[in-house]
Amino acid sequence: MFFWKNNQSPITPEDQDWLEKSFIKLSTLFDRTVILEKERVLPNNDFFDWHFTGEISDAEKSLALVCNQMDVELSNVNLSFYSEEEVQFTDEGLLAIPQKDDKRTAGKYYQERDGKYEVLLEIQQLKSPVDMIATLAHEVAHIKLLGENRIILNDEPLTDLVTHIYGFGIFSSNSSVVKMNTWSGNSHTGWRISGAKGYLHTKIHAFAMALFSLIREESDLDWLNYCEKDIEKEFKKSVRYLKTQDLSSFIEKVRNPPVQKKPKDLKQVRLKKRNK
């Protein structure tokens, strides 16, 4: 007797529909070479040829790499830092707990101040190179969408997806994984939770990577070795499911999108909406 694996979708039909429509939308907003040919950035010495020490210089070097990869002029981006109160762990345990309604951020983006873009990085991001790079890629993705007048209204999930097409999918996906680490002090032991950055769930990131891999007809999947185990597992589940589906129409729309007319001056359209 043969037992077939259950190839149900790991995400909801609504999420899959959103992903497919979003990839089609991005294919109309960006040149097809971005979708099909942008190199996938890996967290290794081939791309990051320096030792991360948690200093501000790490963020500056990383931003330069992100801007170069995402076709943004570095000289037009101002990088600064801010701090938010976090859970502190001492030898005796918890020192402070954020309020339940406290909305914390990893980075911020402000548009065109003195003719430049403002990218702000929460200082704690310097402790985690993967989270820091994912955050910087997300903020630069805001520049690609809002700063370069491709969309009118901010769309955070779509911004996360832009990091995938520009090669930072591994970082955004790994950064979305919740990690549990143990800690111990002189008289207490326990655990802490970290991670879960970004606006898309881990399973949606993994499904997006699977869709994107099929769009690009990738045969070499060695980059999966750099993914968190949860991402790798969900990616493989997504691929198994997608191979049972007819994606020909979707893939054709992404690879060869119809030419769409854009507003004459999208920047002015957005300013008018903002001033209403």
Image (cartoon, grey):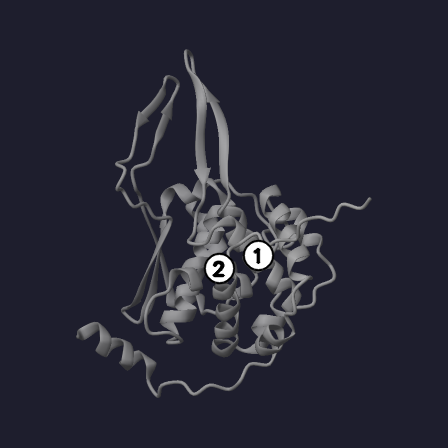
The residue to which callout 1 is attached is 207
Residue 189, by quadrant, is: top left
Q: Which residue is drawn at 50% across and 29% down?
A: 181
Q: Residues within 10 Å of mark 1 (few under 14, many from 20)?
A: many
From the viewer's perspective, is the residue at label 1 or at label 2 nearer? 2
Q: Is residue 151 above or below residue 244?
A: below
Q: Is residue 89 above or below residue 148?
A: above
Q: Nearer the viewer, residue 235 or 108?
A: 235
Residues at discs 1 and 2 in contact (Cβ within 8 Å): yes
The residue to which callout 2 is attached is 15
Q: Residue at x 41, y 67 (%)?
A: 75
Judged left or right of residue 96, residue 163 is right
Image quarter (top left, top right, bottom left or bottom right) of the N terminus: top right
x and y, in percent, of residue 240 in the image: 68, 55
Q: Which residue is drawn at 29% across and 37% down?
A: 85
Judged left or right of residue 222, residue 125 is left
Residue 145, by quadrant, is: bottom left
x and y, in percent, of residue 33 in the image: 60, 75
Q: Residue 74 carries which label?
A: none
Q: Is residue 212 above or below residue 90?
A: below
x and y, in percent, of residue 263 in the image: 36, 86
Q: How far apart are marks 1 and 2 (CA)?
A: 10 Å
Tag 2's secondary structure? helix
Tag 1's secondary structure? helix
First along the sequence among labels 1 and 2: 2
Image quarter (top left, top right, bottom left or bottom right) of the C terminus: bottom left
Judged left or right of residue 174, residue 55 is left
x and y, in percent, of residue 218 in the image: 70, 64
